Amino acid sequence: MSEYVQALAEDRRRREAWMGRWVAAAGEPDRDAMERARRALGVEDQHAARRRRAS
Amino acid sequence: VTGRVLDRTAIIDVVRSGGSVYSRALLFTAVDLGVPLSASAAALLDAWSGLPPDDRALMDLFLDAPALSITAVDVSEAARAGIRAHRRGDQARFDAAAAHTVELARRAGFAILTEDPEPLLALDPTVEIELLPGE
């Protein structure tokens, strides 16, 4: 595995570990609010986009 | 994809009990997707001063977020933010944390997440604002 791929995997592990700690301390984030946040950040949620197109 | 700069009010909103679900969702989403968030150390100081003791543990966890970078107000940051804020806003009520927050946002090209845009817009009416939704 290249150093780049290893670094990506390590970054993902670190982020998931933090997300687990956050959920344990603050609870699950609100799903609707997360979708709003994704849109605000310019990240298209593929599942939401498909639902929008289908409706 | 674009990041956000969090001002004092947004930092407090993320970590205080009873804060908006949106600010926490935005933090979580940013960490999940690797979207950068930043804040001024001066805004962080303001936030610590306004945070009830019971919410300090969550502040520590917030500060450990992989997506988050805190920028100290060192000599060069002070010069940049001070020069940008020169003769802007009400000098008698100058807000150093707001000035550094605006500087970080302009430099990175990020919007500022806030529930109180007035001190920021007084320093730079063109800075992009994302207003925290009232809940």
Image (cartoon, coloured by chain):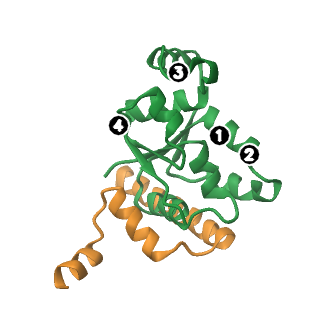
Q: Which chain carries label 3?
A: B
Residue type at mark 3 is: Glu
| Circle 3 crowding by C-alpha within 10 Å: few under 14, some 14–19, many from 20 | some
Q: Mark 2 lies on which chain?
A: B
- Reading the image, the residue beneath label 1 is B44
Q: Which of A31 and A13 is in front in this view?
A: A31
Could you tell me residue B93's position as x and y percent? 63, 24
- Reading the image, the residue beneath label 3 is B77
The quarter of the displayed image where residue B78 is located: top right
Query: Which chain appears orange?
Result: A
- SS at badge 1: helix
Circle nearer the viewer, 3 or 2: 2
Q: Which of marks 3 and 2 is nearer the N terminus?
A: 2
Q: Nearer the viewer, residue B36 or B83?
A: B83
Residue with the most extreme right position: B53
- SS at badge 3: helix
Residue B50 disc label: 2
Q: Mark 1 lies on which chain?
A: B
Contact flag, marks 4 and 3 (Cβ < 8 Å): no
Q: How far apart are marks 4 and 3 (CA)?
A: 16 Å
- Reading the image, the residue beneath label 4 is B109
Q: Distance between the residues labelled 2 and 1?
A: 10 Å
Q: Earlier in the sequence, mark 1 or mark 4?
A: 1
Tell whether B73 sits left or right of A5.
right
Q: Which of marks 2 and 1 is nearer the N terminus?
A: 1
Residue type at mark 4 is: Gly
